[in-house]
């Protein structure tokens, strides 16, 4: 057994370290800072040194595993992993990078040892992931009931404000992902402006509740209807467009809505936003305040409880949970209906769909309107949860995040969207130090998914309809 890397392997490690140093030195090592005399430059050479060292260790472990030299692969991976716990790394991002990179390198070394130094090809990796995805999809009913039990019991197990706020945020994005999944996953239309429907729902609720003194339960369906009207307006101009042109128009629609919200100051408040958005009551029976100002009693007095602000958060948590479950139920039912099968036919081949006599105009409009309705519901909930809305909450980045959730989970997969939301929204909350690197993390994650799982994590889906003659016991080959 060899105890050192080959010349090609050593050259590869040195080349990677040199490229990393050239890229990181101006990007990470030099940072502009504000000072009394103007704009200055702050040096972060330690961060560059540690980053290049960790990259070199990771590359050394990968090359050693590829050349079947475990005596080098395992120590390099373990040193990288332990450095995340023990080494005085200057930033939280480097700690996360050391831990994640060390875990990946150690896993790769173990797999390469089991395979005798033979690398894992894309085909074998994809086949293995397809098997795992198929088993997960087959167990979806059981997994769904387990998840349902967990989310229902969460406020009682962890009655913490931060935990509930993060859970509400995750459920909101799950609801948005399920809504966008109708357009992208089922109908096969790339929508880059879904945040526009989210914004229409939020502003519709806020304006109706403030100007007309309507309750949340009245404004919620109205916000969905107005968002659906926005989907109808977007659907007509893009009926004849496909592919990249379609995506560009939807992107433009999202930016148009944001610009209108900024400049229509008399109605939307412009960049200042809308303050004091009314909170929802307990089904019109009680208010979540210590001393109610209206005719309704206080929630804690109605049930004989001590006043706590957490009561309203728990109610909002269960409210978004119910809304998300309703969206999921309707999405699953729509997929099994003729319109759902028509959407999937249009996604697979639009020309063949037209040859079958299906009206593509109506199909696209229905997809936009139904998906926009769900986005409007989510926007109305967002407005009442925050109590304040502004155009800054509805930028293109929000559309990118929702689309990333749908693509990462597997277009058309309801369970995949839940898993992707936990990864995309939950992990940044756990590693809050990565907030400045969120888009970089998204970019790396999406590139890895496009390379290894271009159809998403759970791309294997059950068919909408089965031919029982080919599936039963008496099927003929």
Image: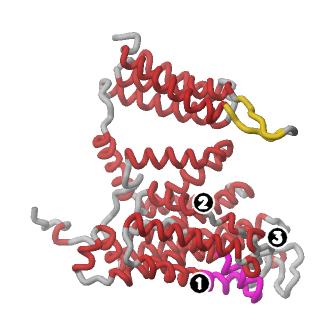
Give the alpha-carbon distance from disc 3 to disc 2, as whole Å.
Answer: 29 Å
Place residue 357 in its image quadrant.
bottom left
Region in magenta: 202-223
| Quadrant for the C terminus in the image | bottom left
Q: Front-most of 56 and 335?
A: 56
Residue 195, percent from left and from top: 57, 68
The main secondary structure of the magenta stretch is helix
Residue 320 position (above or below residue 15): below
Residue 342, percent from left and from top: 32, 77
Residue 131, percent from left and from top: 32, 49
- What label does residue 170 carry, if any? 2
Q: Front-most of 427 and 49?
A: 49
Residue 63 position (above or below residue 33): above
- What label does residue 305 carry, if any? 3
Colour scheme shown: secondary structure
- Identify the mark nearer the N-term, 3 or 2: 2
Q: Mark 1 packing: few (<14 Cα in 10 Å), some, or many (20+)?
A: many
Mark 3 or 2: in front is 2
- Identify the mark nearer the N-term, 3 or 1: 1
Q: Mark 2 packing: few (<14 Cα in 10 Å), some, or many (20+)?
A: many
- What label does residue 226 carry, if any? 1
Mark 1 or 2: in front is 1
């Amino acid at each position: 057994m060899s105890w050192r890397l080959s010349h090609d392997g050593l050259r590869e490690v040195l080349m990677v370290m040199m490229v990393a140093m050239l890229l990181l030195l101006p990007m990470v090592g030099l940072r502009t800072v504000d000072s009394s005399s103007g704009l200055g430059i702050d040096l972060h050479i330690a961060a560059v040194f540690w980053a290049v060292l960790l990259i070199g260790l990771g590359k050394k472990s990968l090359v050693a595993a590829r050349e079947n030299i475990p005596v080098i692969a395992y120590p390099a991976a373990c040193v990288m992993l332990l450095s995340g716990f023990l080494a005085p790394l200057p930033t939280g991002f480097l700690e996360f990078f050391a831990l994640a990179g060390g875990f990946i390198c150690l896993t790769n070394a173990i797999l390469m040892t089991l395979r005798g130094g033979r690398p894992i090809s894309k085909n074998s990796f994809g086949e293995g992931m397809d098997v795992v995805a198929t088993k997960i999809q087959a167990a979806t009913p059981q997994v769904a009931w387990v998840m349902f039990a967990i989310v229902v019991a969460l406020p009682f197990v962890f009655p913490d404000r931060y935990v509930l706020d993060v859970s509400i945020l995750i459920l909101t994005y799950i609801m948005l992902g399920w809504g966008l999944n109708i357009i992208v996953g089922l109908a096969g239309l790339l929508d880059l402006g879904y945040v526009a429907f989210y914004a229409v729902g939020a502003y519709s609720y806020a304006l109706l509740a403030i100007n007309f003194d309507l309750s949340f339960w009245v404004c919620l369906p109205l916000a969905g209807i107005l968002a659906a009207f926005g989907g109808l307006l977007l659907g007509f101009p893009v009926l004849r467009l496909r592919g990249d042109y379609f995506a560009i128009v939807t992107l433009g629609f999202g930016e148009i809505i944001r610009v209108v919200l900024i400049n229509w100051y008399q109605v939307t408040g412009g960049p200042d936003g809308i303050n004091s958005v009314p909170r929802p009551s307990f089904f019109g029976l009680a208010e979540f305040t210590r001393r109610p100002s209206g005719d309704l009693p206080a929630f804690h007095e109605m049930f004989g409880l001590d006043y706590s602000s957490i009561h309203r958060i728990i109610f909002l948590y269960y409210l978004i949970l119910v809304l998300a479950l309703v969206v999921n139920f309707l999405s699953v039912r729509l997929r099994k209906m003729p319109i759902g099968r028509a959407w999937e036919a249009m996604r697979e081949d639009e020309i063949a769909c037209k040859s079958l006599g299906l009206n593509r105009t109506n199909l696209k409009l229905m997809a936009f309107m139904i998906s926009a309705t769900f986005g409007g519901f989510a926007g109305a909930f967002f407005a009442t949860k925050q109590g304040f809305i502004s155009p800054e909450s509805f930028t293109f980045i929000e559309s990118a995040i929702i689309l990333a959730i749908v693509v990462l989970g597997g277009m058309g997969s309801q369970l995949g969207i839940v898993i992707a939301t936990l990864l995309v929204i939950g992990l940044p909350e756990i590693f809050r130090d990565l907030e400045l690197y969120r888009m970089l993390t998204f970019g790396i994650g999406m590139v890895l998914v496009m390379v290894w799982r271009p159809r998403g994590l759970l791309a294997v889906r059950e068919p909408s309809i089965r031919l029982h003659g080919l599936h039963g016991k008496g099927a003929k080959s």
